[in-house]
Image (spheres, rainbow, N blue to C red):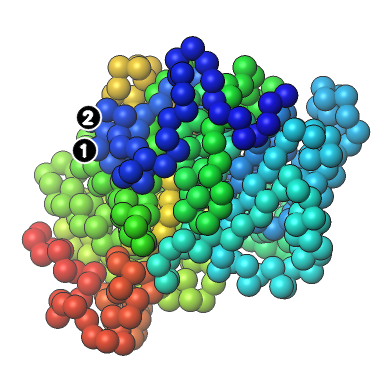
Amino acid sequence: MTSDNDERDGPERTEPAPLWPPEDEPGPADPESEERGVWRYEHCTRATLVVDAADYFLLIQQAMLRAQRRIMLIGWDFDTRIALGRGRGWMNIFKRRHPPRRLGAFIVWLTKQNKDLKIRVLKWNFAAVKMFFRGSMIIDLWRWFKNRRITFKFDAAHPVGCSHHQKIVIIDDRFAVCGGIDMTAERWDTRAHRDGERLRRAPGGKRYMPWHDVTMMVEGEVAGALDELGRNRWHIAGGEDIPPLPHQPESAWPPELKPQFTDIEIGIARTRAEWKDHKEIAEIETLFLDMIRKAQRFIYAENQYFASRRITEVIAQRMGEPDPPEVVLINPLFADGWLEQEAMDTARQRLVETIGRVDKQNRFRIYVPHTDGDSPIYVHAKLTIVDDMMLKVGSANMNNRSLGLDSECDLFIDANRPANAGCDEQIRRIRHSLLGEHIGLEAEEVGPLIERYGSMHALIDRHPQPGRRLKPLPMRELNGLQKRMADEEWLDPEDPSDFFEPIVGAKSRRPALFRRLRAPV
């Protein structure tokens, strides 16, 4: 085995490329990328969308068991107390003893099984406060600290008020995960979202509400690009320079996971606020707006928030057209936490009211998923599908923070690209599967029912939903202070400097929410 510091070799490269280019990061891979809001497109040998954390935690444990040289865990939060897979049955493949279930112990166990393996964990620095209330997590971090092949680092490389929000795992430069699922507490749930699920408990035993989320597993050169992004982020956060690995003949792809896509091109889009010598990146915002503008028939989206003025502006323009696309947005009933509810829920209500003024055909609707027992399901997913021709999944929400302040990363599949011919059929299956999950139908039933009723809205409105169901988002009255907080974006600004705007005075006399929502609103 070569060391982790060896440079990549092979017939196509005689010397290693500079890890940190003069312009901080390499530009788009082709001329179309920049205008479409994509950092670069890379070849992907296999890709699969993973829905909900019960499956994801099992699969990511299987993948990490196959790691040979390096694992990079990059996230908004990590809780070492959570249990991943139970490790029964498929463990016979590896001929090893049963691994620990808890994330913290599992990471240490991996380094003992493979002396060539190095593991790096990058976590948002503000979330460090939570560690002091997590009991045994301090012990786990001490064990990590003593292990020379485990490096744990807090990411503080952002302006005040911004956060590190990416959720990425990279294994051996050949396999990666990018999406919305954090390896932390109160994330685990199955696609059934059962009422009273006994395993849906936080490490301390606390029960939490049903939770819906998505992420994507990829293999190939796209994983190498995410590895480059991760190494760059590690360096920006104050870590050492990490060189690329030599080519790995095999990836950590879980052997039992069937790919939904094979041999396609996947785009990568990012968000990052300007910080010190690192320029602002707003690719995800450009991509979001481009997808909405290009929608011809429908937009299906699942997102934790709906609080972006720019996204609302473009949707309002589309809703004012003679034949606007159908927009189905799946949201949680309320944000997670009082402060987020004040910031996001009030802004959502004001934005929905704004769109409603021009949406004469009622084509834009927000729905909240509910369990069989009528409990609301929290939606943490960040997924957008347009006309079954474009699919975007990652960490970015539909709020101002994700479009300009926080560090984000999304993956993008565009069936319009020649290399992705035929992807539309698989994207359609994904949309039907997700919609079926929310209204208690099998994926195969959804397509014929949409044809029968004529639209997704009509299917949701008219088809019986005796169990799981989607309900229209209820509207509520806002008081004067809530309206002002939403309109002026006090808690969800578009620029880091705007955090202090309520104190030092607004930059514009026009409320921020409506600065550019002039015509047709």
Within 10 Å of the Cα at label 1, are there few (<14), some (14-19), or many (20+) other Cα atoms? few
Q: Nearer the viewer, residue 241 or 64?
A: 241
Reading the image, the residue beneath label 2 is: 31
Could you give the CA–CA distance between mark 2 and mark 1, rounded to whole angstroms? Answer: 8 Å
Reading the image, the residue beneath label 1 is: 35
Q: Nearer the viewer, residue 46 or 153?
A: 153
Q: Nearer the viewer, residue 196 or 397?
A: 397
The residue that appears at 79% across and 69% down in the rendered structure is 135
Compared across the picture, whether 100 is left or right of 124 comes to right
Q: Quadrant of residue 98?
A: top right
The residue that appears at 34% across and 24% down in the rendered structure is 415
| Position above or below: 221 against 72 | above
Q: Nearer the viewer, residue 114 or 336?
A: 114
Within 10 Å of the Cα at label 2, are there few (<14), some (14-19), or many (20+) other Cα atoms? few
Q: What kind of element bears circle 2?
A: helix
| Position above or below: 87 against 184 | above
Q: Measured from the top left, where is residue 412 in percent x and y?
A: 39, 35
Compared across the picture, whether 292 is left or right of 73 comes to left
Q: Quadrant of residue 508?
A: bottom left
The residue that appears at 23% across and 85% down in the rendered structure is 505
Q: Does the rendering let one see residue 407?
A: yes
* Quadrant occupied by the C terminus: bottom left
Q: What kind of element bears circle 1?
A: helix
Compared across the picture, whether 256 is left or right of 266 comes to right
| Position above or below: 462 against 356 | above
State the mark number for residue 217. none
Q: Measured from the top left, where is residue 185 in percent x and y?
A: 68, 58
Q: Measured from the top left, where is residue 374 in percent x and y?
A: 59, 58
Q: Amino acid at mark 1?
A: Glu
Q: Amino acid at mark 2?
A: Pro
| Position above or below: 470 against 209 | above
The answer to whether mark 2 and mark 1 are in CB contact below 8 A is yes
